[in-house]
Amino acid sequence: MLQALDEDPTVSQRALARDLGVAVGVVNSCMRALVRKGIVKVRGENNRTITYHLTHEGVVRKAALAVQWTANTLEFYRSARRQVADRIAELVEAGHRAAILYGANELAEIAVLVASATELRVVSVVAGADRPVADSILGVAVVSASEATSVDVRADVVILTEVASPERVGALVEAFPDATMCSLLGQLLTEEAL
């Protein structure tokens, strides 16, 4: 909310509510608390002329929140990378050398990065949606689900980096019958789980 107010002091509470995905009453309650705490100052006579401005305290708080968000994001990334590295090490230890990732997302990006330093080669990334959002992730081709099942790609493990519908998992099992199916951060998927 502080970012939005800093970018556009003329923004209405209704527009803020829409952008934040909350009720107008929630924005109004938060705004009152921000004013009471001296973080935001309201100027104007009526609803059409009201503007919201960050006070010095508001600018300081916004900066502190940005620093905290960055620290949390970096810690999340480090934790995810450690977990992915452990999982990929298990797969390499089990003898897997060629992988397909299902899900073109941030977790897939971390997996491609981590795998590049191991004996596991990521041969393709399958977009969870029918149309890939990017052509590649760190140099690894991203293909649609329909392309993945029609292309002759050799992999001994298919790694899910996002939740897949039972139909998608079934199609992957059919397309790669000799490949082990696993979730990146979970256990190997057994036939009972499929």
Image (cartoon, rainbow, N blue to C red):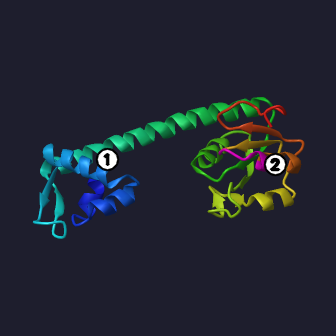
Q: Position of residue 178 (x, y in %)?
A: 89, 42
Mark number displayed over residue 172: 2
Q: Vertical placement of 188 versus 163: above or below?
A: above
Q: Quadrant of residue 131?
A: bottom right
Q: Vertical placement of 127 versus 185: above or below?
A: below
Residue 166 sits inside the magenta stretch = yes
Relative side of 119 to 191, left or right:
left
Q: Position of residue 139 (x, y in %)?
A: 66, 58
- Asked whether 44 or 87 is in front, the reply is 44
Q: Separation of disc 2 and disc 1 at Cα?
A: 41 Å
Relative side of 44 to 121, left or right:
left
Relative side of 94 to 185, left or right:
right
Residue type, label 1: Ala
Q: Residue at 25% across / 47% down in the picture?
A: 29
Q: Position of residue 15 (x, y in %)?
A: 33, 63
Residue 121 sits inside the magenta stretch = no
Mark number displayed over residue 9: none
Q: Which residues are magenta?
A: 162-168
The residue where tag 1 is placed is: 66
